[in-house]
Amino acid sequence: MPMLGSYGDIVFEHSADNVRDFCDMAITTRARWPVSEPAYGMVRPQYSGAGQSEATFDMHVHAQLGVNVPEMLKTVAEKLRNGMVAPLILGDEPIHDHDWLFEQMEEKHIRRGRDGAVVYAVITATLKEYN
C-alpha cells in the first residue's frame, strides 16, 4: 500500500481498500526580528533566530473510498484535544528535524448520506513546529 505520508498514527495512503489523502499543503517558515526603539533615531529590527514553522493542509475523507468518515472526524478531533505532538512525514522523509504540535482543525461536511451521516468531509489541519 503506497503511503503518502503521516502525522503520528494518522497515515495518508492510497490502497485498493482505503484512500486517506491530503492536499494543498503549505509550510510557512519565519525568522524572529524583534524591533528595538531607541530614544533617538530610527527603529532597528534585529535578527534573533529562527521562528516557528507552520504547516497547513487539507485531509479529504470519503466513505466511497473506504473511510469511516464520522469515526475519522472523531479520531482527529480527539488527537487535537489531547495535545498531539508527532513527526510530520512526507513519503519517507520528515519535514524539519522537530516534531509538530496539532494546533487547530476545521472540518467541512461536504456531503451527507440519506441517513444524514457525513460521507465526505475535508479536514483543514494547522500544525506548528515543536522543539
Image: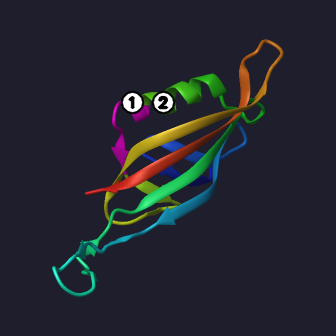
Is the residue marked by circle 1 packed among few (<14), some (14-19), or many (20+) residues within 10 Å?
few
Point 71% across, 24% down: residue:
118
60 sits to left or right of 112: left
Q: Nearer the viewer, residue 45 or 9?
A: 45
Point 51% across, 60% down: residue:
90
**x, y percentage for residue 62?**
72, 34
What residue is disc 1 on?
81
Mark 2: amino acid: Ala
Q: Quadrant of residue 124?
A: top right
What residue is disc 2 on?
77
User: Helix, strand, or loop for circle 1?
Assistant: helix
**x, y percentage for residue 104?**
46, 41
**x, y percentage for residue 97?**
32, 65
Q: Does residue 57 lie above or below 124 as drawn?
A: below
- The segment highlighted magenta reads 79-86
Say the numbered circle drawn on residue 116: none
Total numbered labels placed on residues in the image:
2
Residue located farthest toward the left when viewing the structure as drawn: 39
Q: Nearer the viewer, residue 13 or 47?
A: 47
Query: Dots 1 and 2: beta carbons under 8 Å?
Result: yes
Is residue 42 rendered magenta in the image?
Answer: no
Residue located farthest toward the bottom when viewing the structure as drawn: 41
User: Helix, strand, or loop for circle 2?
Assistant: helix
85 sits to left or right of 76: left
Q: Does residue 130 lie above or below 17 as drawn?
A: below
